[in-house]
Image (spheres, grey):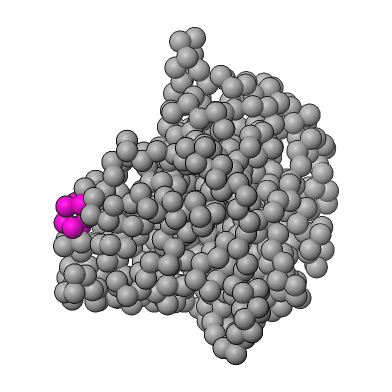
Amino acid sequence: MKILNKRIRVAVTYFSFGIIFSSQIASAAFVSPLRTKKGMVVSANHLGSDAGLQMLLHGGNAVDAAVATTFAISVVEPFSAGLGGGGFLLMHQGKTGEIKALDFRERAPIKATRKMYLDQYGKVRPNLSVDGYLAVATPGTVAGLYEVHQKYGKLPWKEAIKPAIALAQDGFIVSRVVTPRSMSAYQGRKQSILNNPAARVIFTRNGEFYQPGERLVQRDLAQTLTEVAKNPQSFYTGNIARLIANDMAKNGGLITLQDLKSYKPIWRTPVCGNFRSSRVCSMPPPSSGGVHLLQILNIIGDTDLKSLGWHHPDALHLMAEAMKIAYADRSEYLGDPDFVKVPVQQLISPGYAKTRRAEIIMDRAKPSTEVKPADKKMLQRFISWKPTPTPERLRAKVGALNSPSHESPETSHISVVDGQRNAVSLTFTINLGFGAGVVTPKTGIVFNNEMDDFAAAPGVANAFGVVGGDANAIAPRKTPLSSMTPTIVTENNRLRMIAGTPGGSTIITQLVQVILNVLEYNMDAGAAVSAPRIHHQWRPDELRTEPFGLDPLTLQELGRRGQNVKENAPWGNGNAIVVTPDGGLEGAADIRGEGAPRGF
Ligand code: GLY
């Protein structure tokens, strides 16, 4: 397994209750980060990272590298993300420190309706939003990559697609990428793949998946990529669009030529907040990621976690209670801001966080039934909240400038930093492994099942177990709510770290912990993305832990406080690049996956 190829080191000592526990009780394997000076690309597959590095070495910038890596990942991780899906990116401009956010998430087809997945009794018809053509939303990956490249790329568009075309045309050796991650997608979605003739032909040989050591060639996808390299509009108005629309019409899908033609990526204002001496910026709605990342960090506030010690029960309990509050709010308030009013400023306000922090009882876990979304009237109190001065502005004011597996098979994250400290943090997806299990003949495109990220009915959980209501109800052209959290952290207007991860509803809590690991606990990038983690999403009422993630006394103490601790298979597959105090770069991919940093 690729993980074994990674240099690992073992964290042997944990402090808890003032007692030192040794590695026999709790240990974790961390990857060693790659350290370079100029530029770096980290993705979930070394072939993806190689494609991006190629761009940087040929004079391209972070955007060129991100575009090349995204297309390459679409080929070598057909189960996680690709042209048939969508995503979000944050970019940091080294020169100005400006941070921009691009939404190229899928949109509901024009023919979609609020009750499209309900039967005559108003009950959700299982699987319709997950498997097959009706689950597919209008894809945005090609439009999004073209948009950001047109505005900010340096190399010709077709250069950035070249590595992906070669990987699709010549193939890649499956053994190099088969891991528990890809296998879980292959095995878990096998029937869906077998049900779709085009998918079956590409990904299986007579019904059996390609085996380790075999070469997976995707000629149709190579042809599609070649066409996109010549004319990206072909995906939305040309030959590719016609193939997609015809296939949808034939098989009960809703996407039409009009859906494709009218698809537009949207530049949005990132959500930003201060944490310690850093400024954390992330994706605004229609992702819930940034809002709840900031909300959880705000609730933690100035609690000195570091003095408590890493994974002290008080720290874990506080995080879990904060997570419950955030996901309760998510279920009530989050949705596509072009359709519903999302109280973003209120939810990310430190004042609101303080109010919710006061509800947390440190000695007793509140059952989810007792944790309510914010009362609408109470939220009003924070309506006049204005962003507090950034640490940069604060410092300027006081003149204090003297001191200088089983990881998630769906979704993929890419982190890129170039020599000018431009950075791109990009997460994209086709939702579940192999999306809807739909491939349009002659295109090689695997289509998403992002419609499942809508609330099919109020309070009915989606595939990730998260619930929603009116705010995230289905409507034509609406964007399904996401948890993707591509994030950029700055200090004094300079890049400090970028990070992101797959993992559905767990994405937000993973990011909270990766950021705390770097900013609060001074972990390096490798330890930060690999360290054991916890997750709570309000409903179901369980605090997820990983095998060997917490020592027995900590587990016992959390149980005593009333946390409903449930051990789960490890989740997530994030990556991060941290800017070190000497200005160098330190990058790593999660020990749980097969990702790799590349740099120079
Ligand atoms: N499809 C998972 C997400 O966007 O959160």
Q: Name which residue lies at 50% across and 41% down.
A: 378
Q: How many marks?
A: 0
Q: Quadrant of the C terminus?
A: bottom right
Residue ranking furthest to the bottom: 402
Residue 250 visible, this orientation: yes
Q: For the stretch drawn in magenta, what is the main secondary structure?
A: helix
In the drawing, does residue 18 fall left or right of residue 439?
A: left
Residue 224 image position (x, y, % from top left): 73, 45
Location of residue 349 by image quarter? bottom right
The quarter of the image holding the N terminus is: bottom left
367 sits left or right of 268 in the view: left
User: Where's residue 448, x and y in %?
Assistant: 58, 38
In the image, residue 469 above or below residue 541 = above
**Camera-nearest residue between 483 and 75:** 483
Residue 559 shown in magenta: yes
- Bounds of the magenta segment: 555-561
Q: Residue at 38% across / 66% down in the picture?
A: 303
Is 370 placed above or below 271 here?
above
Left or right, 231 with reference to 97:
right
Q: Does any portion of residue 597 appear in the rendered image? A: no
Q: Where 296 falls versus 209 (above or below)?
A: below
Residue 535 position within the rendered picture, expressed as x and y whole percent measured from the top left:
36, 52
Q: Residue at x 25, y 62 (%)?
A: 313
Whether 492 is among the magenta residues is no
Identify which residue is drawn at 33% across, 51% down.
360
Residue 370, how many percent across, how many down? Answer: 32, 38
Question: Quarter of the image holding residue 442?
Answer: top right
